[in-house]
Amino acid sequence: PGNGTILAVSDERRELVRQAATKLMDNIKSNVRPRDIVTKEAIDDAFALDMAMGGSTNTVLHTLAIAREAGIDYDLKDINEIAKKTPYLSKIAPSSVYTMHDVHEAGGVPAIINQLIKKGAIKGDRITVTGKTLKENVAGAEIKNEEIIHPIEHPISPVGGLSILYGNIAQDGAVIKVGGVDPSVKTFRGKAICCDSQDQALELIDNGTVKKGHVVVIRYEGPQGGPGMPEMLAPTSKIVGRGLGKDVALITDGRFSGATRGIAIGHVSPEAAEGGNIALIEDGDEIVIDLPNRTLDLLVDDATLEERRKHLKTFKSKISSGWLRRYTAFAKSANVGGTLMSDEEFEERKAERQAQEKN
């Protein structure tokens, strides 16, 4: 407990390392396994904390991957249900002036968890790595500064800081940090400007091609396409830095850094390399983002999309050897954490692509 905000160079961190090593050996002797602790309820709690802190979209990707490795069938849609019942309690840089050190001084993650237990957003009765319940771990943790950590009675927002969007661009979902979007932006409608790489997007932003009212579409940067799903921090930073944070949106099958803010939607699934509809968007197409209704739609009719699909080339990775080539061949889209396919799933993908190439 406390690990999330303790400074790296502090005496507290050194003591935490000692405690963690001791507890690790105790758990080995007691035959406590990761799957005893990583349960569906534990995943729910992790997402609830993420919502309360307006956390990084990366937590969605990594936690879904952890769930899959633990054998837990976790639906991306469950995250929206958690968001609806979890208040936003602590806004942290770059979305505010407060840093993680400030959060630590204000009571840290234990104080936030304690508030969520009071609300019922976290149950608190499951066992943790300490051998105690989550509720026992945070007992007595109180808020010391209500400007930094809001009490449950006066949240920043009654709903969490992350949202999963669905629509004809992202049939399997996409992620946005709504806590990093200007509160005045509820919906956004703009014209697509398409880029098949992050580098191309950076060039268009730098030379002034990207203007107010554009939706920058960066594709082929997902788990397969990247490969490895690189962060799109540079494009979002440049958009905000040019004063366009409320006037330009960005959607991508890549991911973002925790420092991202603005109308930035990532993890679009299925990704372009998998033949997702993000690959069918053309310059000038209108795109509508509706945050209250959690939708992301391309205003192009199905018949037109199907006609475009007939001319869509089968994805060919630029990686031709090594482990990255293997990852590219087996990677799944972000809605399941960018994890690897089974052998059976790989053979199905291979057969589908061979059929596409024949057509």
Image (cartoon, rainbow, N blue to C red):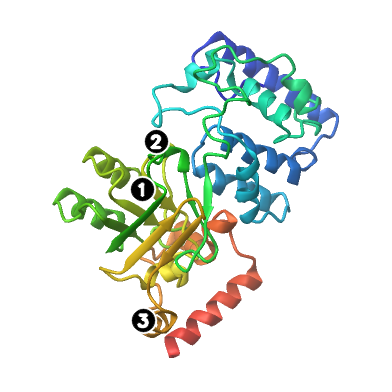
Q: Is residue 21 visible?
A: yes
Across and down, in percent, residue 75 comes to 66, 56
Residue lying furthest bottom in this view?
Answer: 359
Q: Quadrant of residue 84?
A: top right
Across and down, in percent, residue 247 comes to 28, 48
Residue lying furthest left in this view?
Answer: 207
The amino acid type of the residue labelled 3 equals Arg
First-in-chain label (2 vs 3)? 2
Query: Dots 3 and 1: beta carbons under 8 Å?
Result: no
Query: Dots 2 and 3: beta carbons under 8 Å?
Result: no
Question: Element at badge 3?
Answer: helix
Which residue is the site of mark 3?
Answer: 308
Residue lying furthest top in this view?
Answer: 11
> What residue is shown at x 23% (from left), y 40% (from top)?
243
Q: Is residue 235 above or below residue 167?
A: above
Which residue is the site of mark 2?
Answer: 259
The amino acid type of the residue labelled 1 equals Met
Near mark 2 (Cα within 10 A), the count class, few <14, some 14-19 or many ≥20, is some
The amino acid type of the residue labelled 2 equals Ala
Quarter of the image that includes the C terminus:
bottom left
Q: Is residue 244 above or below residue 148?
A: below
State the CA–CA distance, disc 2 to disc 1.
10 Å
